[in-house]
Image (cartoon, rainbow, N blue to C red):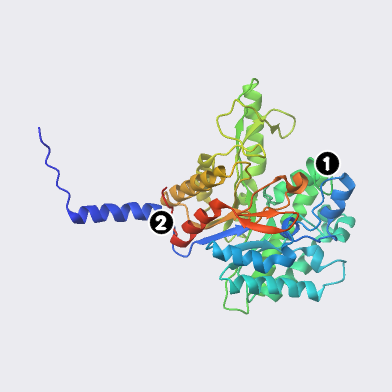
Amino acid sequence: MFVNIKISLRDLRLCWIKVLMNIQFPDSFLWGAAISSYQCEGGNFNSDWCSWEKKQGLEEALSACDHYRLFNNDFELAKKINLNSIRFSIEWSRICPDQTTFLDEEIEHYLKVIDSLIKNNLKPVVTLHHFTNPLWFADKGGWSDSKNIDYFIIYLRKMVGILKNKVDIWLVFNEPLVYIYNGYIRGIWPPGEKSIKLAVKALNNIIKAYIIGYQEIKSIYKDTQVIPKISLTKHVRVFSPCDEEKAVLNSFSAFVRDKCFNFWLLDYLNKKKCLDFIGLNFYCKEYTKFKFLFGSECKSGLHKERQNNLGWYVSPKAFYDVLIKLKKYKLPIIVMENGTSESDENYYGNYLREHLNSLLRAINDGVNVLGYFWWSLLDNFEWEQGRKGKFGLIEVDYNTMKRKIRLFAYTYGKICSQNRLIIK
Ligand code: BGC
């Protein structure tokens, strides 16, 4: 029996256009990489993290990636791999080494950083607070004292006022809940507290500071033609119960973690109408086992996903699921951090492709995504883990500070320049 199949040239063309559309990212998509001041610049000795490292006997950031000195070179490399944007943070403790001083030369430094970005066709996206505080602010009680909110707002007002003609995407805070959890509940980051009471106070104050900061930034731009986009970054993880015994209790802890860490902050800020977009940080899936109050992470060979060199479970499917869940906010999304740290070079490329594939699937399923930033541009200083994290598109030799573009970064570069997923 013969089936008469007639495919015209027009059908073929339409079919090809359809395939292309499905691998194409939206126009003007932001393709970037993210960094933070303390993790890359080096020399941030007035920060609470610096004194914490000493106090705890942790590996010290010291000159980190020496990015403070080498920023021009780093941005030229970013341009070489076709990125069109960089997310970086301003170090508050550099600008204000004490309560009453704003150092002009440090403000000047960040102006140079932004000019260098613009010269290299890289759109600046600025974070005002990425986990670190000036030491004097921490000594005054830091975020747990509501009287201190004003200090942050004064710094915000000053920096936004100076940079408003060069920057239009602002992240007031990076991952407030991660900061609070590690600094006030687990006590593994400064200020090293283990107190629910202080955690609630500090979180409350950060949320207040965010809302005030959001409104301040809006009013600073009032006399300009520009409408700024303001948000914070929210770390979202998918929590699954550990595949060990005590299934019911593990499911309970996974549920608690999901409720406490994932969406309530976005729900709250969205209701207050102070999110212009969602800044999503996504890395992995987490298995949770029962432990009073928030459960704890469970690492076991029983789980099907691969673990990266920091033990994180790689799950592009979870990334897709999170993006679909965020659709309910009806806000644009910018993926402000996504990345991995690996011992085997080949895994970076796989991680990148699989996560971009999930991103594209979500976009094709109606999620409004404006950009994607790989974490990180450089092998950054990874907080309490020191130099163990190797997240960079660019590898850093810490002895010589020499940079080397990783192979997968060229693949990323091709995707960025063609604005579509390249199928191997
Ligand atoms: C933080 C970065 C950190 C990265 C990898 C993010 O949650 O914003 O500072 O380096 O995760 O752990």
Q: Nearer the viewer, residue 111 or 232?
A: 111
Q: Quadrant of residue 285?
A: top right
Image position, residue 319 (x, y; %): 53, 44
Spatial CA span between label 1 and label 2: 48 Å
Taking 417 as reference, is 344 left or right?
right
Number of disc labels: 2
Q: Nearer the viewer, residue 61 or 256?
A: 61
Residue at horizontal 45 percent and vertical 59 percent from the top: 419
Residue at horizontal 90 percent and vertical 56 percent from the top: 139
Q: Residue furthest front?
A: 400
Q: Residue furthest top?
A: 245
Image position, residue 384 (x, y; %): 77, 45
Closer to the camera: disc 1 or disc 2?
A: 2
Query: What's under tag 1, amino acid-wise?
Result: Ser
Q: Nearer the viewer, residue 2 or 162?
A: 2
Query: What's under tag 2, amino acid-wise?
Result: Gln
Taking 228 as reference, is 209 left or right?
right
Tag 1, which secondary structure? loop
Question: Which residue is the site of mark 1?
Answer: 195
Numbered tag placed on residue 25 in the rendering: none
Taking 58 as reference, is 287 left or right?
left
User: Eyeballing the image, is 248 above or below 389?
Assistant: above
Q: Is residue 2 visible?
A: yes
Numbered tag placed on residue 24 in the rendering: 2
Image position, residue 284 (x, y; %): 60, 41
Disc 1 C-beta below 8 A from ligand 1: no
